[in-house]
């Protein structure tokens, strides 16, 4: 396997261990399937050539799986960008342009990977990383608060089982539906198809501030939550599903821009 070289990531940062499996396996497959549905013909042909037919779905979780491998030993903190709470939109956008020196490397890596694929569109590893990490960009707890490690330190009872806020958003909310990834992708397409164009037209700044405000809403709701899991699912499932769909649409847009 050719090892991907990302120059800006030579400087390493050390963080407390946290769970970073954004969206869980089902979530990333859902996002990849939606993206595949929206690739133009030229892009789909080129990506299938690099990854195999529908490889965008089959490789969607590779970036999580290799955390136990030595090929990319420093990729752990590529999956998240934890932030301080209470920032204004202007502060957040300025921070995005001047990468923070703590809390993860998700933003830095996404820019680096995009540059790699622009110059080397057949880079197998860069493509697999960007498929996965685009999804992480839309997972609210992957831009959670620094002081609780993206919600990992916030305890949560999910139908009587001990978990944490990070895992609820990575996995539990999605699994509550009981759909396969293909069923879920089909459902989201039918539910949000009228929004695809507007999602594609959103600026990077608008996406960034939207995701940050959602994370803030999750923390605020958590502070006053009554502990009823059904209430939580009812309140946030629609929001979570929009995030999944938007991630798929934005991934398709990015890949169409690079390959199409």
Image (cartoon, grey):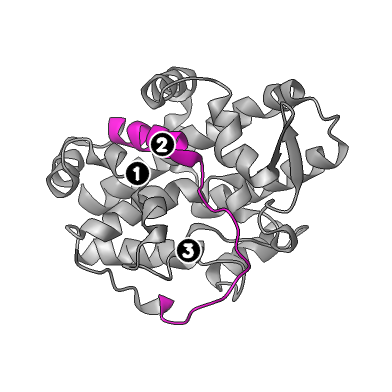
* Point 62% across, 26% down: residue: 237
Asked if the residue at tag 3 contacts the one at tag 2, i.e. Cβ–Cβ closer than 8 Å, the answer is no
- In screen coordinates, is 187 left or right of 115? right
- Callout 2: helix, strand or loop? helix
Q: Nearer the viewer, residue 205 or 140?
A: 140
Q: Is residue 29 above or below residue 92?
A: above
- Callout 1: helix, strand or loop? loop
Residue to which mark 2 is pinned: 31
Q: Position of residue 73 (x, y in %)?
A: 40, 70
User: In the rendered structure, does residue 24 fall within the stretch colored magenta?
Assistant: yes
Residue to which mark 1 is pinned: 60
Furthest toward the bottom, the residue is: 11
Q: Is residue 231 above or below residue 82?
A: above
- Callout 3: helix, strand or loop? helix
Label count reads 3
The mark closer to the camera, 2 or 3, is 3
* Cα distance between the residues tagged 1 and 2: 9 Å
User: In the rendered structure, does residue 253 fall within the stretch colored magenta?
Assistant: no
Asked if the residue at tag 2 contacts the one at tag 1, i.e. Cβ–Cβ closer than 8 Å, the answer is yes
Residue 76: assigned label: 3
Magenta residues span: 9-37
* Point 36% across, 54% down: residue: 130
- In screen coordinates, is 96 left or right of 54? right
The mark closer to the camera, 1 or 3, is 3
Q: Earlier in the sequence, mark 2 or mark 3?
A: 2
The mark closer to the camera, 1 or 2, is 1
Q: Is residue 166 above or below residue 240?
A: below
Q: Position of residue 251 (x, y in %)?
A: 37, 44
């Amino acid at each position: 396997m050719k090892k991907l070289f990302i120059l800006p990531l030579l400087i390493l940062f050390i963080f407390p261990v946290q769970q970073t499996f954004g969206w869980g396996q089902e979530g990333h497959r859902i996002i990849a399937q939606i993206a595949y549905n929206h690739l133009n013909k030229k892009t789909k042909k080129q990506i299938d050539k690099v990854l195999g037919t529908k490889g965008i779905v089959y490789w969607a979780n590779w970036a999580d799986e290799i955390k136990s491998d030595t090929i990319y030993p420093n990729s752990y903190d590529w999956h998240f960008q934890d932030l301080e709470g209470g920032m204004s939109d202007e502060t957040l956008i300025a921070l995005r342009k001047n990468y923070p020196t703590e809390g993860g490397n998700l933003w830095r890596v996404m820019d680096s990977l995009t540059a790699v694929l622009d110059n080397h569109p057949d880079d197998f590893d860069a493509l697999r990383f960007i498929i996965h990490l685009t999804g992480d960009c839309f997972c609210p707890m992957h831009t959670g608060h620094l002081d609780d490690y993206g919600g990992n330190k916030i305890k949560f009872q999910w139908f009587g089982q001990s978990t944490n806020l990070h895992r609820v958003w990575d996995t539990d909310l999605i699994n509550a539906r009981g759909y396969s990834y293909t069923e879920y992708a089909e459902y989201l397409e039918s539910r949000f198809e009228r929004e695809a164009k507007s999602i594609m037209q959103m600026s990077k700044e608008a996406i960034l501030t939207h995701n940050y405000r959602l994370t803030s809403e999750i923390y605020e709701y958590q502070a006053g939550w009554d502990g009823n899991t059904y209430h939580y699912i009812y309140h946030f499932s629609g929001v979570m599903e929009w995030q999944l769909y938007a991630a798929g649409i934005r991934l398709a847009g990015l890949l169409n821009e690079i390959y199409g």
